[in-house]
Image (spheres, helix red, strand yellow):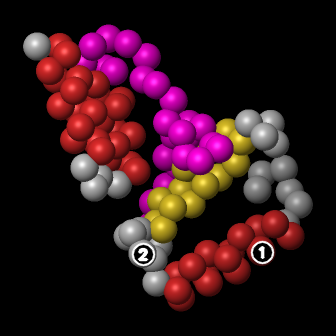
Amino acid sequence: MKQELERGLEQAGKRDAGFETRRQKRMIAAAVFGRKPPPTMLDRYTVIRELGSGGMGTVYLAYDDQLDRRVAVKLLRGRGAAPEAQARLQREAQVMARLSHPNV
């Protein structure tokens, strides 16, 4: 039974589910079976937790192993984000890169 549930959750997580859905299913499976959830990887980033969500997308606190620091990673909603949204995200990243403050 345990193996069937684990397989079912794993396969459900692979079927066109968004990043957050897959992450939540891994956490649920870990809680059900009383074990620590595996780290969720997003490219080179280890996702620690969700910071917030808005109209444009979701922001996660993550750890960048290459730079050895915590970072914020923003994922846009939808698979093929509109070019306008991608341009806006690019401008936002450029503005944030110019800021130098310990709380940012």
In the rendered structure, which amino acid carries the disc numbered 1?
Answer: Val
Per the rendering, the mark at residue 95 is: 1
Left or right of 37 on screen, residue 72: right
Q: Where is residue 93 in the image (x, y as percent from the top left)?
A: 71, 70
Residue at the image position 71 percent from the left and 42 percent from the top: 64
Q: What element carries label 2?
A: loop
Residue at the image position 22 percent from the left and 27 percent from the top: 7
Quick one: label 1, few (<14), some, or many (20+) residues within 10 Å?
Answer: few
Residue 35 on the magenta span: yes
Q: Quadrant of residue 12?
A: top left
Magenta region, residue range: 30-54
Quick one: label 2, few (<14), some, or many (20+) residues within 10 Å?
Answer: few
Who is closer to the viewer here, 53 or 37?
A: 37
Left or right of 2 on screen, residue 25: right
Question: Can residue 57 be seen from the camera position used here?
Answer: yes
The tally of labels here is 2
Residue 49 on the magenta span: yes
Who is closer to the viewer here, 16 or 33?
A: 16
Residue at the image position 30 percent from the left and 45 percent from the top: 14
Q: What element carries label 1?
A: helix
In the rendered structure, which amino acid carries the disc numbered 2?
Answer: Gly
